[in-house]
Amino acid sequence: MIYTVTLNPSLDYIVSVEHFQAGIVNRTYQEKILPGGKGINVSTVLKNLGVDNVALGFTAGFTGDEILKRLKEFKLQADFIPVKEGMSRINVKLRSDEETEINGMGPKVTKEELEQLYQKLDRLKDGDFLVLAGNIPEGLPKSMYMSILERVKEKKLQIVVDATKGILVSALAYHPFLIKPNNHELQEIFDAEIKTQADTCFYAKKLQEMGARNVLVSLAGDGAVLLTEDGEVLIGSAPKGKLVNSVGAGDSMVAGFLTGYLETGDYKEAFKMGISAGSASAFSEELATRKEVEVILRSHHFSME
């Protein structure tokens, strides 16, 4: 079974405005509300691709109730812990000439509520996948992922981490099955300028040397790079298409990669599925469906190097 953890889920309020201007009244021409947070996005795409999974995390207040309601309507298995203080955040995604995001804070999680999450993680079994995705909300220690990984280290889990900078680096000591930085995050981690695919591969290799088994680096419109634990270096081109929605594309790549790996046991096929799922989400109003992913898989020549 695959379990995803979203410590700070959200309701994503996605609005479209023609030629947004600050300081005046702007009116939307399109609105949408979706449950969000990186782990939830991974769970959603996994479900779309036919892979059973369970979404874990915290919810609070009326916004938390709405998140759970929408996940239930989607028939996604959700096992979230109710938090007493505060409310789950609302993230505003403004689409106009430029894309702008305003992300909320989220609730305050107590030690008792945190312990409930640990108890759920204690039930995971050898062979399960655990996906830790997103940043740590205010109020929780920045070492949160390390605490989780320390708690489950005796289990033979396949760990996936998709987080930024220090949070990601701290997880490497636990030899995660997969990490997925993007090129910008890779630059932040090493405080280095990355201009070429060779640069990307060089720094991805450093992350592998620091403990990651497989390193998947998303390059937005330039495709992706995968360094496998078998020593392969794969560079895949990105499919051509109109960017509609960048939110969740990286999470979709993780879900696609896991789906491809579970279906074939082959890293190259998993890589293709990951690129296809990430692109399908980027080209769609919502997260990728199986049909959209398969269209790209069949039609795109991946130009693997």
Image: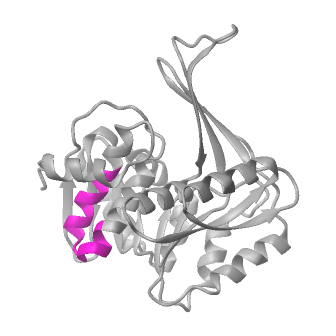
Q: Residue farthest to the right?
A: 85
131 or 27, nearer to the observer:
27
Q: Is residue 155 above or below residue 121?
A: below
Q: Is residue 80 above or below residue 301?
A: below
- Please say whether residue 276 is one of the residues in the magenta stretch: yes
Q: Which quarter of the figure is the C terminus placed in?
A: bottom left
Q: Is residue 279 visible?
A: yes
- Please say whether residue 237 is one of the residues in the magenta stretch: no
Q: Which residues are magenta?
A: 260-277
Residue at 59% of width from left, 52% of height from top?
A: 37
Residue 72, image x and y in percent? 61, 59
2 or 138, nearer to the observer:
2
Q: Is residue 186 visible?
A: no
28 sits left or right of 294 in the view: right
Residue 108, image x and y in percent? 82, 57
79 or 88, nearer to the observer:
79
204 or 126, nearer to the observer:
126
Residue 299, image x and y in percent? 14, 46
Q: Residue farthest to the top?
A: 24
Residue at 11% of width from left, 50% of height from top?
A: 303
Residue at 38% of width from left, 65% of height from top?
A: 50
